[in-house]
């Protein structure tokens, strides 16, 4: 990804890996970033500020005051300017100072004033990395929201393997790009109204019995949370989902029980949405004549229950789709692709997510899912088995691109 327009503070502390920072700096510049180097006094023992200034095109900051002019270097201004701070290499000592707020050099004061995300690439002797003190400090940084670029493996003095060598500059660049991509994703659905149906429906037979199915609502809820994370305005119409399921803050929830109630709620919300995701497992049939009183056991013989077709929510909404983007699901046991494509056509959907019950770990009652996505324009996307959160992200990626986000 291009880093054009991104402001990055590159903090360099005193480790042998500092020579790799020059290469990292070059990579960041090549991707279009503007980089300000901040180096510790020890860092200068390993790489000269002249090299770094030449590569970054900016004077390197190291002391609190510029030696020649006496001008004060403002770490506060750097914190406001930067979009990301990368400390590479981060020695055990620098990590310790960061974790404990020991602000005795410009790099640490810059860290303590940072408003931006901070990323640390540790570099040290493998035994030092393994020491509980270092691990404690790294844990503290993690808790403080710092991204740790895990060091590489090598051999300890004992002959066993351990970690400590700084990750390669290409991998640190990739971590920075991933961070900026995730920021971009976080706002990619801003201003988009997403309506999601989730869970099963229960069709009453009498006050104590119903026709239902095993849908938990996990997939629909995961999609709702993913949309919200990307800045969408989200409404969930939930059937009787698993009680342990919750939605993230800021998501509107409308609870319903039967298919007819779900249809009414969806129709009400549909007018104002941009995207509707029909993740509910709607009961196709409902008792023709639900009883007000509990049905008694007959003294002898069987009873029969007449069931009638429920409305097809997806197809009903599909008839008045306009410019809205409709996403449906298909849960199949056979002729999967043919059935899924048929449903997309019949219900006037723009995209359909196929789960095959023939795939172990897919469908209802699992934390995982394996899906294939078909789009109206003929695109087909296949994915491996993943947890439902990651599947939700794939599904949202697919329709986000469909609506040009
Ligand atoms: N759906 C719906 N209303 C229904 C039945 C299904 O809105 N009464 C939606 C589901 O939410 C899903 C899609 O239609 O997005 C396909 O659901 P599925 O149960 O697989 O399809 P059906 O049309 O019910 O076909 P069948 O049960 O015969 O496979």
Image (spheres, helix red, strand yellow):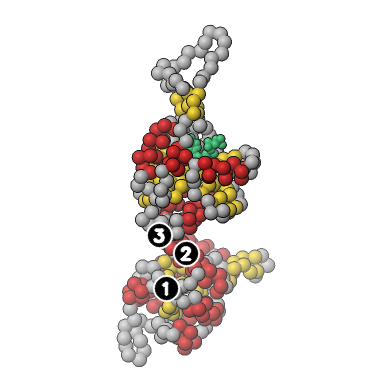
- In the image, is residue 377 above or below residue 363? below
Residue under label 3: 187
Reading the chain from its start, which is encountered first: label 1 or label 2?
A: 1
Q: Is mark 2 within 8 Å of ligand 1?
A: no
The label shown at residue 77 is none
Q: Residue at x 58, y 49 (%)?
A: 372
Does dot 2 land on a helix, a strand or a loop?
A: helix
Residue under label 2: 181
With 31 as the anchor, is 274 left or right in this view? left
Residue 171 position within the rendered picture, expressed as x and y whole percent measured from the top left: 56, 70
Q: CA distance from mark 3 to mark 1?
A: 17 Å
Does dot 3 land on a helix, a strand or a loop?
A: loop
Q: Residue at x 41, y 85 (%)?
A: 59
Q: Visible in this render: residue 157?
A: yes
- In the image, is residue 305 above or below residue 8? above
Residue 33 position within the rendered picture, expressed as x and y whole percent measured from the top left: 45, 76
Q: Mark 3 or mark 1, which is nearer to you?
A: 3
Residue under label 1: 6
Residue at the limit of the structure toward the right, as seen here? 159
Q: Quadrant of the C terminus?
A: bottom left
Residue 254 position within the rendered picture, expressed as x and y whole percent measured from the top left: 37, 39
């Amino acid at each position: 990804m291009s880093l054009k327009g991104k402001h990055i503070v590159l903090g360099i502390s005193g480790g042998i890996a500092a020579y790799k920072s020059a290469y990292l700096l070059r990579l960041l510049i090549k991707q279009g970033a503007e980089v300000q180097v901040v180096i510790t006094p020890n860092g200068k023992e390993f790489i000269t500020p002249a090299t770094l200034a030449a590569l970054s095109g900016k004077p390197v900051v190291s002391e609190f005051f510029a030696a020649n002019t006496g001008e004060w270097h403002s770490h506060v201004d750097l914190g406001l300017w930067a979009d990301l701070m990368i400390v590479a290499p981060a020695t055990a000592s620098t990590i310790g100072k960061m974790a404990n707020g020991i602000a005795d050099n410009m790099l640490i004061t810059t860290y303590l004033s940072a408003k931006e995300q901070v990323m640390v690439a540790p570099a040290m002797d493998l035994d030092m990395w393994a020491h509980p003190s270092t691990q404690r400090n790294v844990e503290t940084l993690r808790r403080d929201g710092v991204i740790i670029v895990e060091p590489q493996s090598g051999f300890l003095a004992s002959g066993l393997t351990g970690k400590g060598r700084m990750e390669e500059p290409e991998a640190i660049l990739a971590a920075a790009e991933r961070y900026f991509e995730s920021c971009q994703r976080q706002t990619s659905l801003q201003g988009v109204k997403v309506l999601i149906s989730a869970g099963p429906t229960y069709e009453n037979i009498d006050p104590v019995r119903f026709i239902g199915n095993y849908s938990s609502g996990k997939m629909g809820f995961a999609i709702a949370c993913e949309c919200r994370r990307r800045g969408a305005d989200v409404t969930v119409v939930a059937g009787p989902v698993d009680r342990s399921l919750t939605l993230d803050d800021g998501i509107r929830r409308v609870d319903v029980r039967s298919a007819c109630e779900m249809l009414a709620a969806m129709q009400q919300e549909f007018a104002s949405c941009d995207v509707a995701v029909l993740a509910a497992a709607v009961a196709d049939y409902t008792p023709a004549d639900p009883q007000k009183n509990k049905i008694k056991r007959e003294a002898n013989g069987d009873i029969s229950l007449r069931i009638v077709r429920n409305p097809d929510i997806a197809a009903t909404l599909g008839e008045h789709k306009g410019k809205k983007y409709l996403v449906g699901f298909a849960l199949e046991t056979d002729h999967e692709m043919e059935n899924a494509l048929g449903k997309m056509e019949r219900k006037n959907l723009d995209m359909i997510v196929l789960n095959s019950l023939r795939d172990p770990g897919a469908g209802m009652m699992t934390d995982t899912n394996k899906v294939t996505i078909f789009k109206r324009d003929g695109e087909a996307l296949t994915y491996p088995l993943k947890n439902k959160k990651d599947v939700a992200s794939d599904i949202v990626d697919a329709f986000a691109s469909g609506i040009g986000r």
